[in-house]
Amino acid sequence: MTQNDRKISQILDAALPVFVRFGFRKTAMADIARAAGISRASLYLSFNSKEELFRAGSMRAHTRALDKVAAALAGQRNNTFDRMEMAIAVFQRELIAPFGNSSDAEELFAANMALAADITLDARARLLTMLTQTLNAAAETKEIDLEPLQASPVQLANIMMAAMDGIKHAQWNGSSLDEDTKLFMRLLRVAVTPRSDQSSQSR
C-alpha cells in the first residue's frame, strides 16, 4: 500500500462515523478533515467534494463486503444454509448496519442511491448471482428441494434479496436486523429442506 493509499484509507475510515453522526447533508468536508486528523486543504488534494468522497467510500465498502460474502459462501461449513446465513450476515454487517444505526439512516441510504447507484446495483447483481449459484448447487445435490415451492434458484434468490430490503427498512420501526434475518432464514430453511430430512430430524 502506497502512502497515498494509506491516506485515502485513513480519510474513508474517518468519514463513515462522521456521516453516521451528522447525516450526509449536514456533514462538511471540514468535519471529515478534523476526524481524519488532516487539514481541509490536504483533504481536498484527495477528494474534490464530499460527494466524491462518499462515492469512494461506497465503492470500497461494497468491494470489501462482496469479497467477504464470496469467502463465506465458499467456506468449510457443509450446510448450504449455514453458509448463506453467514454470507447475508456479512453483507448486512458491512453495508447496512453502519448506516442503519444512524438517526439519519434513510437520508444516508438515499444519498448512496443518488451518488453510487451503479456501485450498489452492481453489488446487488453480484450477490444475486452468488446466491443463485449456491442454491442451484444445493438443488443439484438434493440438499434442498424446490419442487414444493415450484420455484427456481434465481426466483428464490430474488425473494431473499427482497426480504433483505424489507428487513432493512423495518429497522426504522424498531425491528432487529439480525433477529428478523435469522427468522426469515429459518422459515426458508424449513420450506426447502427435503421432507425426508425433516422427518428424520423430528424423530
Image (spheres, helix red, strand yellow):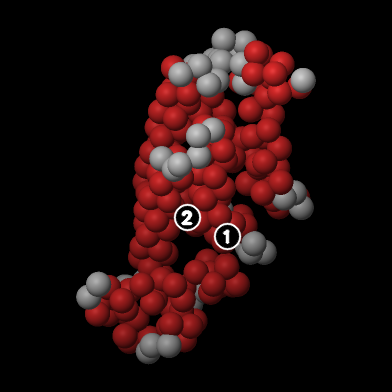
Residue 115 vertical placement versus 200 (above, below):
below
Res 51 seen here: no
Badge 1 element: helix
Image point (66%, 14%), residue name = 195
Q: CA distance from mark 1 to mark 2?
A: 10 Å
Q: Are marks 1 and 2 in contact (CB under 8 Å)?
A: yes
Res 174 seen here: yes
Relative image position of residue 71 (x, y in whole percent):
41, 46
Image point (52%, 50%), residue name = 90
The picture quadrant where one finds residue 22 is bottom right
Dot 1 surroundings within 10 Å: few (below 14), some, or many (20 or more)? many
Nearest the viewer among 139 and 61 is 139
Which quadrant is home to the C terminus? top right
Relative image position of residue 190 (x, y in whole percent):
68, 24
Residue that numbered label 1 is attached to: 99
Nearest the viewer among 145 and 202 is 202
> At label 2, which amino acid type do we have?
Asn
Left or right of residue 19: residue 166: right
Left or right of residue 11: residue 139: right
> At label 1, which amino acid type do we have?
Phe
The picture quadrant where one finds residue 133 is top left
Residue 12 vertical placement versus 44 (above, below):
above
Badge 2 element: helix
Which quadrant is home to the N terminus? bottom left
Dot 2 surroundings within 10 Å: few (below 14), some, or many (20 or more)? many
Relative image position of residue 151 (x, y in whole percent):
54, 15
Residue that numbered label 2 is attached to: 112
Q: Which mark is residue 167?
A: none
Relative image position of residue 83 (x, y in whole percent):
51, 39
> Closer to us: mark 1 or mark 2?
1
Residue 174 vertical placement versus 43 (above, below):
above
